[in-house]
Image (spheres, rainbow, N blue to C red):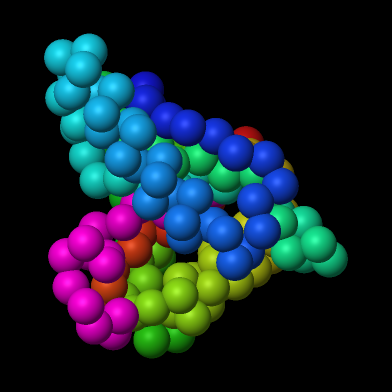
């Protein structure tokens, strides 16, 4: 998949939402200026995070090539389902940031317990967010971890 994106290094946790919002505005301007068409929802690409410093290297990204669909195995995991592809696992977090963090923990645990070698970036696909609804309990985010 090809993305139009803006990447930032060492963005503090408190600055990540505003970095992504500014980045999406620039990315969509670039896409329109160059006659491109978005091919999916905006995504946050997380290349690394430093827990001690509370920073991440991330990108505000919008897919600009067709998304190839592949068949996925459905895995029951507690109260939710995960979907396993040939080189990724994903799940949907419905709700605000705490639900997204829970999904990250669930997917990270699956990668570790399955002895898979993770690949970056980790992808957050924003299906429904602050531009769509005010109530954070109505947010919906696909979280995807790739592996070798």
Q: Tell me if residue 115 comes above or below residue 148 in the rendering.
A: below
Residue occupying the point 53% across, 73% down: 101
Q: Quadrant of the N terminus?
A: top left
Count of numbered badges drawn on the protein: 0
Give whichever of 145, 135 is nearer the camera. Answer: 135
Q: Position of residue 125 (x, y in %)?
A: 35, 52
Residue occupying the point 27% across, 67% down: 130
Q: Quadrant of the C terminus?
A: top right
Q: Tell me if residue 53 comes above or below residue 86 in the rendering.
A: below
Q: Tell me if residue 71 comes above or below residue 126 in the rendering.
A: above
| Residue 5, visible in the rendered structure | yes
Is 135 magenta? The answer is: yes
Residue occupying the point 45% across, 85% down: 78
- The span picked out in magenta is 122-137
| Residue 110, visible in the rendered structure | no
Is 148 magenta? The answer is: no
Give whichever of 44, 86 is nearer the camera. Answer: 44
Q: Position of residue 40 (x, y in %)?
A: 22, 39
Tell which residue pokes out farthest to the top in this image. Answer: 34
Q: State the image quarter where residue 147 is shown.
A: top right
Drawn side of residue 100 relative to residue 15, left or right: left
Q: Position of residue 136 (x, y in %)?
A: 30, 80
Give whichever of 37, 118 is nearer the camera. Answer: 37
Residue occupying the point 55% across, 34% down: 7
Q: Position of residue 38 (x, y in %)?
A: 20, 31
Q: Tell me if residue 102 comes above or below residue 23 in the rendering.
A: below
């Amino acid at each position: 998949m090809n993305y139009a994106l803006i990447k930032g290094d060492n963005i503090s946790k408190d600055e990540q939402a505003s970095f992504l919002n500014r980045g999406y505005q620039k990315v969509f301007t670039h896409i329109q200026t160059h006659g491109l068409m978005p091919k999916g929802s905006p995504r946050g690409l997380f290349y690394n995070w430093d827990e001690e410093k509370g920073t991440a290297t991330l990108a505000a990204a919008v897919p600009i090539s067709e998304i190839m669909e592949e068949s996925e195995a459905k895995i029951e995991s507690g109260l939710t389902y995960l979907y396993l592809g040939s080189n990724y696992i994903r799940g949907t977090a419905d709700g605000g940031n705490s639900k997204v963090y829970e999904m990250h923990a669930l997917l990270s645990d699956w990668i570790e317990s399955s002895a898979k070698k993770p690949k970056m970036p980790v992808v957050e696909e924003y299906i429904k967010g602050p531009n769509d609804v005010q109530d954070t309990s109505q947010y919906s985010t696909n979280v995807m971890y790739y592996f070798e």
